[in-house]
Amino acid sequence: MRMAPGVLREALVDVDAIAENVRHLRRLTGAEIIAVVKADGYGHGAHRAAVAALRGGAARIGVSDIDEALALRRQGVRAPLFAWLHAPGASFAEAVHHDVELGISDLDQLLRAGAAAEGDRPAAVHLKLETGLSRNGIAPADWAQVFSEAARMQRIGRVRVVGLFSHLSNTSLDDDRAALARFEEGVVLAAANGLNPPLRHIAATHAAIALPEARLGCVRIGIGLYGVSPFDDRSAADLGLRPAMTLRGSVAAVRRVPAGTGVSYGYDYRTEVDTTLALIPLGYADGVPRHASGRGPVSINGRRFTVAGRIAMDQFVVDVGDHPVAVGDEAVLFGDPTLGVPSARDWADAADTIDYEIVTRVGARVPRREGGS
Ligand SMILES: *Cc1c(COP(=O)(O)O)cnc(C)c1O
């Protein structure tokens, strides 16, 4: 395949795949979907991911921080929006003003949310319970105090408690079941304090699929939206999900070289025979992990090659042997492996990381374009 003239590199984002992944996960879980589009939609573009997820039937959008939520509001997203990781001392007033729901991890945040209520508009909050991940979340010792204060503030119209939530460690199903049991204790204690919020949510993609009892009628789906599997031993296709991102570049130079030619910085790779080298214009500035030097896969004209030598900031080289490759041919780093190209998982394996990181770190220099591969 040929790339369009003038295109050096791009990430194709298949928004229909995102919508379809949401539909599939709704059917599979029977739960309401909070579509997580933090970190610029895991690199796919937060706004387009949110719009596609809502089209696929997501009920609510989740992001990490308030700035991400406000950006989506500015871009016209009207759906319920939820943000859970706050700067120390962050002002919640703007969030409340723009109808952004707040994850609350301690009494101080709850009080500040209440103080940010506007006229007859209470601050909408989801109380986050620490159940074993050891990140943020209300400590079990503080649950009773925070619940009773939240109930009091709800009675006087300062807050509206929309949900109780927590987050799992994915250590093992048994560890996740233990966290779920702690969460259920919190739900009971909240009810005893007069809090019966409409939503309870603890499962991200992994538990939403693997632990049905964790669905609780509402799940937070991040990586699954993008058609990437959170399981070590099950591919996206195994889960009925379709990868939404294809990262590709246009072969920028082709050179015939003799045996013994050193390739890229440090000559970590030397050609063994007369061969052809192709230059791919993506580098670590574009999120191609340098750690995958000598290992990452690339598909050109239906054939798979491996990065030769070091990945540089803007480019890397592949040794294509005697296969016909021309300037302007499409080089796919990853996409939907059912179409014969490498997957984000292949790159994750080559870089000793997880595919979450591969898609999320695609650099700002890479233009995103909506379209199927
Ligand atoms: C990122 C995140 C999610 C989504 O997790 P996935 O594994 O990508 O589905 C859900 N909940 C919280 C609190 C998160 O930080």
Image (cartoon, rainbow, N blue to C red):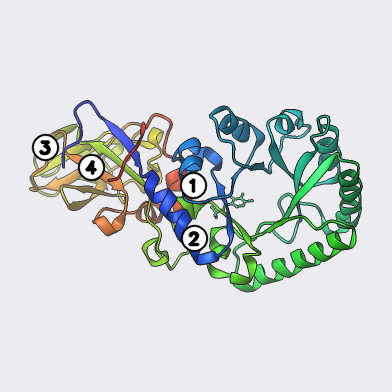
Q: In the image, what residue type sits under mark 1?
A: Ala
Q: How many marks?
A: 4
- Label 1, label 3: how far apart the Cα atoms are: 38 Å
- Label 3, label 2: how far apart the Cα atoms are: 41 Å
- Label 4, label 1: how far apart the Cα atoms are: 29 Å
Element carrying mark 4: strand
Residue 351 seen from this side: no
Q: Which residue in the structure is indicated by mark 1?
A: 53
- Label 1, label 2: how far apart the Cα atoms are: 11 Å
* 107 lies left or right of 92: right
Q: Position of residue 211 (x, y in %)?
A: 58, 70
Element carrying mark 1: helix
Element carrying mark 2: helix
Quarter assignment of residue 133 = bottom right
* Mark 2 or 4: the one toward you: 2
Quarter assignment of residue 199 = bottom right
Q: Quadrant of the N terminus?
A: top left
Q: Which residue in the structure is indicated by mark 3?
A: 326
Residue 331 tag number? 4
- Label 2, label 4: how far apart the Cα atoms are: 31 Å
Residue at coordinates 48% horizontally, 54% vertically from top-left? 22
Element carrying mark 3: loop
Q: In the image, what residue type sits under mark 3?
A: Ala
Q: Which residue in the structure is indicated by mark 2?
A: 25
Q: Position of residue 352 (x, y in %)?
A: 44, 54
